């Protein structure tokens, strides 16, 4: 099994940074952050000139997250940077919350 140390996030935005969307990266993950960084600029250039603002970032990840459900949360700052966080989704907590709400509905 290969070890994934980083993933690439590519984002294209309007000139005012109000409308942004993700673009597919050339690979799902990278074994080293250096490998990701080596492919970052070519990937940004390949997004096309029809996108007013393009951004990319290599994000290091904890290999233990490969076994967890996690959500990638990102934001483009007004200065043109990308802030990225990985939020672990706890399925047990979600099930407990649903069960609690359902129990409250059945209380008379």
Image (tube, rainbow, N blue to C red):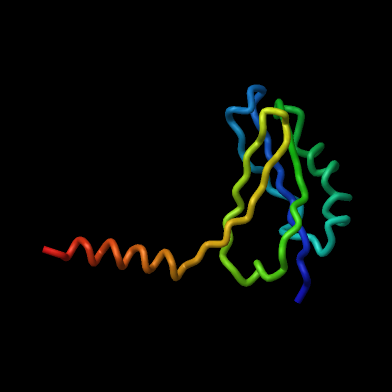
Occupied quadrant, residue 2? bottom right
- The structure residue drawn at horizontal position 72% and vertical position 68%, both measured from the top left corner, is 63
- Residue drawn at x 88%, y 50% is 38
Report the side of 92 relative to 43 (left or right): left
Residue farthest bottom in this picture: 1
Q: Is residue 49 left or right of residue 77?
A: right
Count of numbered tags: 0
Tell me the quarter of the image containing the C terminus.
bottom left
List x then y, in percent, for residue 88: 57, 61
Q: Position of residue 100 (x, y in %)?
A: 30, 65
Q: Nearer the viewer, residue 63 or 20?
A: 63
Q: Outermost residue, left direction? A: 108
Position of 51 relative to 73 (above/below): above
Q: Quadrant of the N terminus?
A: bottom right
Q: Nearer the viewer, residue 15 or 88?
A: 88
Q: Residue at point 41% right, 64% down?
A: 94
Q: Is residue 108 above or below residue 14?
A: below
In the picture, measured across the screen, residue 68 lies left or right of residue 104, that is right
Residue 74, how many percent across, how many down? 62, 44
Q: Residue at x 82, y 46 (%)?
A: 40
């Amino acid at each position: 099994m290969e070890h994934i140390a980083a993933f690439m996030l590519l984002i294209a935005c309007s000139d005012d940074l109000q409308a942004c969307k993700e673009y597919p990266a050339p690979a799902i993950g990278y074994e080293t952050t250096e490998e990701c960084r080596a492919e970052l600029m070519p990937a940004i250039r390949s997004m096309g000139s029809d996108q007013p603002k393009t951004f990319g970032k290599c994000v290091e990840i904890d290999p233990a997250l490969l076994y967890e459900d996690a959500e990638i949360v990102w934001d483009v700052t007004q200065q043109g940077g990308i802030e990225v966080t990985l939020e672990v989704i706890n399925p047990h907590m979600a099930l407990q919350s649903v069960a609690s709400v359902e129990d409250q509905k059945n209380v008379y």
